């Protein structure tokens, strides 16, 4: 039973502490849209999405209004398009036409993003995979709401270094094609290791082949709620701190579970998972960095930062799994630089570097996220950063990701403004020494010894 105190507490979380449901994401399988004729394939994709998602936005708005809990984004994820378009697409333009269709469908149903312009190439690339990857700069430069991701490694398969090399080049080309928008296209492109099939967050969401035909996944977020909770135990020991975070994560996840179940019922779509990630926004008081500072750090990046983030991530997961039987996606703490004012402040103060962020990704839920770098960084250096992050994910049996934005025409010390949830970011320095000979080797980095569990 929910008592009056808990109702008041939840209202306070919403009104004063930025508690929200960050996204309800409808996952849609497009496997039944496969057709050797591209025009027929495009028609099937458009019809499947617009029929399946026709009530998504309206339902989300109704639930938010009735329950009093903001639902910030309504999104769609689809089957990796490299699979869907393999039978029909012979050129990069063919694949880009599918991106155009996804964008048109997203506009029709009113969602803010559609994810799944993706390929999964952990062990190698098919001709269709490579063709889709090479089409990404074109697709992202001429669409508004399409998001793209490429999974280049896994604990079980190792790392496809040919794909890693190619993705460095693709990120550079995407930056150049969208240079007039401060290389915004790269903000919609993620490179993964161990990508989950049920992630509701963009830009990395896709509807994995292990999923059913249609499913609803929900992502909750409450950095401000967690920060307010731990302010009340300032100076207390770690046991008290952990218990406080865990209890708060439980309450936040229960809100997400409630919204997910209601959306499932109203849409007549199976409920998938709740992703209980702490996802920050540029809004004041909605920052993961501020939580870490409240624990006792002067700035994120100071000694102790990685330990504090590990504690936060673990307690969020422990509290969340008690609140829902179906926790999935990424689930933990996000550390995107441009979307978190505390992270931006730490970079500006000189406390947080790219190398420290990489160390933090060993214990958080994602990776190097929304990091603006100088526009003259080479494709090989970008590939090297990707390879490092993929190795962290592979060896530690966790999801890691890279979303780098080489801002054409800008350098260290300058700032780039993306707007909205994407925020703004200072350009961060990249190690100037090269790795081109290493990246050019080609082939595959084999899976670690602990991957053999059969």
Image (tube, grey):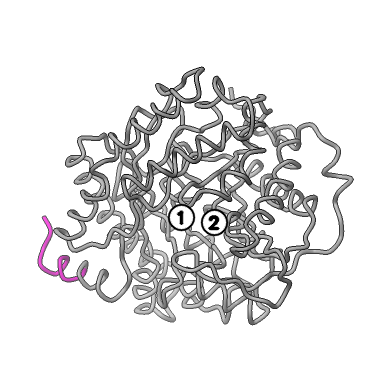
Q: Is residue 5 shown in magenta?
A: yes
State the image quarter where residue 252 is shown.
Answer: bottom left
**235 versus 91 height, above or below:** below
State the image quarter where residue 406 is shown.
Answer: bottom right
Residue identified by numbered label 2: 364
Residue sitting at the far top: 36
Q: Residue at x 48, y 69 (%)?
A: 419
Q: CA distance from mark 1 to mark 2?
A: 7 Å
Q: Is residue 242 shown in magenta?
A: no
Q: Residue at x 71, y 34 (%)?
A: 160
Q: Nearer the viewer, residue 90 or 410?
A: 90
Q: Residue 197 in the image: x percent, y percent?
A: 46, 36
**19 versus 204 height, above or below:** below
The magenta segment is: 1-9
Q: Residue 277 in the image: x percent, y percent?
A: 42, 55
Q: Residue 170 in the image: x percent, y percent?
A: 69, 46
Q: Tell me the quadrant of the picture where the C terminus can be found.
A: top right
Helix or strand or loop: what does disc 2 sit on?
loop
**396 versus 297 height, above or below:** above
Relative placement, left or right, of 315 versus 18 is right
Disc nearer the start of the sequence (1/2)? 1
Q: Main secondary structure of the magenta part?
A: helix
Residue sitting at the far front: 39
**315 versus 305 height, above or below:** above
Residue identified by numbered label 1: 332
């Amino acid at each position: 039973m929910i008592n009056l105190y808990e109702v008041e507490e939840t209202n306070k979380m919403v009104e004063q502490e930025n508690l929200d449901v960050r996204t309800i994401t409808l996952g849609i399988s497009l496997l039944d849209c496969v057709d050797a004729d591209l025009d027929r394939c495009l028609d099937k994709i458009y019809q499947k999405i617009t029929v399946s998602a026709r009530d998504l936005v309206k339902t989300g708005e109704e639930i938010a209004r009735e329950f009093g809990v903001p639902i910030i984004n309504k999104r769609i994820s689809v089957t990796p398009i490299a699979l869907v378009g393999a039978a029909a697409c012979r050129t990069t333009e063919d694949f880009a036409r599918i991106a155009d269709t996804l964008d048109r469908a997203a506009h029709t149903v009113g969602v803010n993003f559609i994810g799944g312009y993706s390929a999964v190439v952990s062990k190698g690339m098919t001709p269709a995979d490579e063709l889709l990857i090479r089409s990404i700069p074109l697709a992202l430069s001429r669409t508004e709401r399409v998001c793209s991701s490429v999974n280049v490694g896994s604990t079980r398969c190792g790392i496809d270094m040919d794909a890693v090399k190619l993705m460095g080049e693709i990120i550079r080309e995407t930056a150049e094609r969208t240079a007039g928008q401060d290389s915004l296209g790269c903000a919609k492109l993620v490179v993964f290791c161990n990508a989950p099939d049920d992630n509701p967050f963009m830009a990395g969401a896709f509807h994995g082949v292990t999923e059913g035909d249609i499913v609803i996944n929900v992502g909750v977020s409450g950095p401000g709620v967690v920060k307010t909770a731990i302010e009340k135990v300032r100076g207390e020991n770690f046991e008290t701190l952990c218990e406080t975070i865990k209890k708060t994560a439980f309450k936040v996840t229960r809100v997400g579970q409630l919204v997910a179940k209601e959306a499932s019922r109203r849409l007549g779509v199976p409920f998938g998972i709740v992703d209980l990630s702490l996802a920050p926004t540029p809004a004041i008081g909605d920052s993961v960095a501020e939580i870490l500072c409240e624990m006792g750090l002067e700035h994120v990046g100071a000694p102790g930062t990685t330990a504090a983030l590990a504690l936060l991530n673990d307690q969020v997961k422990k509290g969340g799994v008690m609140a829902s039987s179906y926790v999935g996606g990424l689930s933990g703490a996000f550390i995107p630089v441009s979307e978190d004012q505390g992270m931006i402040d730490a970079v500006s103060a000189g406390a947080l570097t790219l190398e420290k962020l990489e160390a933090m990704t060993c214990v958080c839920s994602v990776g190097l996220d929304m990091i603006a770098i100088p526009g003259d960084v080479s494709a090989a250096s970008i590939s090297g950063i990707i390879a490092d992050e993929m190795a962290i994910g592979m060896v530690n049996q966790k999801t890691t990701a890279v979303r780098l934005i080489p801002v054409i025409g800008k350098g260290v010390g300058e700032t780039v403004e993306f707007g909205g949830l994407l925020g703004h970011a200072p350009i961060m320095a990249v190690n100037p020494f090269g790795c081109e000979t290493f990246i050019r080797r080609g082939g595959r980095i084999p899976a670690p010894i602990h991957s053999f569990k059969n």
